Image: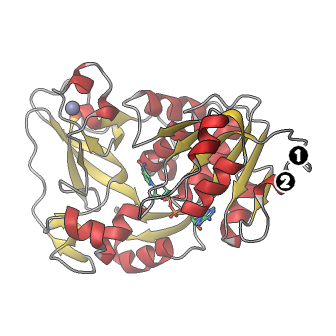
Amino acid sequence: MRALVKTGAGPGLELRDVPQPMIGINDVLIRVHKTGICGTDLHIESWDPWAARTIHPPLVVGHEFVGEIVEVGSNVADFHPGDLVSGEGHVVCGRCRHCLAGRRHLCAATIGLGVGRDGAFAEYVALPMTNVWHHWPGVNEEVAAIFDPFGNAVHTALAFPVLGEDVLISGAGPIGLMATAVVRHAGARHVVVSEPNAFRRELALKMGATLVVDPGERALPDVFAELDMVEGFDVVLEMSGNSTALRAAIAAMAHGGGIALLGIPTEEIALDVNAIVFKMLTLRGIYGREMYETWYKMTVMLQSGLDITPAITHRFGFRDHEAAFEAARHGDSGKVIMDWLS
Ligand code: NAD
Ligand code: ZN
């Protein structure tokens, strides 16, 4: 089969012929239809310090996908050839305290698809049946292809109650863009999106932002009067990983507010702990998706009218992977999709 492979320690990816993955008795084999490019894939492609310490080539990369089941292991009863599915990219141990208690997103022994095992940027991918999510007939396949990052957005957006609240989203990358639509759908009053890139600010407005801010141009407290806000934001979704953005968010919080941290900083960040203490803020780290409550929420929100399609801005065939990665790396994009059928 054709697959996009990190062949050795260094930058780049190669489209190669590799053996189709073998499946065990509890696994399913999936013919990949469409995939999404994630920041993680960009790190692996460029071979940054994180990739150099984490990735052991050769490795088929990629973890965001939708496809059709073509084969199931002898132990698998709930999935059948022809089913349209996506995969949860975190393969958990199944045996630790948290896994046994059904809190699989807290497993400390998680192995990442396309990171610690061969991934989905290929014609076929194999996964344990416990990592597979059924789609409903008629689902938009481009949306289904990005359930993994959409799940990051939903997990973060629903970390604190947002009904009637004023929400700040810091960083309008693909995940911040999807989160904008989610908190709107979930009933937030105002959704302010802070993002330095003008293309992405424009997209954030399409996703339902009340107001967009260029953090280099306008301080956050400056918007309070315009939006009739008294004290500050009730909920912040930190989706930039930027230290300045996090500090600005803490300074702009109302007492008792919650900050859900999804963005991954590249270094340690010094914070105003006095502000956290005296405002009695709650900071909560978010990693991945809740298995499978987040997946359920994604499904039912889409079925009840949530639209995340404006966040998808580019489409390529898998042979044009270099152009696809270039588009994803360029700031003037939302989600970039690669097609594996044509
Ligand atoms: P992205 O890098 O495309 O988006 C980050 C955005 O933040 C960019 O648009 C950037 O312009 C913006 N930004 C930079 N400085 C800013 C500032 N000072 N204020 C406001 N915005 C600023 O990434 P993404 O794919 O949307 O992912 C969002 C973040 O979540 C990234 O940090 C990513 O590494 C992280 N992530 C975390 C998980 C997890 O499980 N915790 C999973 C996937 C991605
Ligand atoms: Zn575990």
Q: Is residue 94 left or right of residue 214?
A: left
Residue located 85% across and 48% down the image: 224
Residue 245 appears in which quarter of the rendering? bottom right
Q: Is residue 158 visible?
A: yes
Question: Which quarter of the figure is the N terminus placed in?
Answer: bottom left
Q: Which secondary structure lies at badge 2? A: helix
User: In the image, residue 254 lies at what x, y percent?
Assistant: 73, 38
Amino acid under disc 2: Val
Q: Residue 227 bears which disc, if any?
A: 1
Image height of 252 relative to 332, above or below: above
Question: Which quarter of the figure is the C terminus placed in?
Answer: bottom left
> Between residues 171 and 38, which one lies in front from this camera angle?
171
Q: Residues within 10 Å of mark 2 (few under 14, many from 20)?
A: some
Q: Residue 223 bears which disc, if any?
A: 2
> Between residues 228 and 3, which one lies in front from this camera angle?
228
Q: Is residue 306 visible?
A: no
User: In the image, residue 68 lies at what x, y percent?
Assistant: 31, 45
Residue located 34% across and 48% down the image: 67
Amino acid under disc 1: Leu
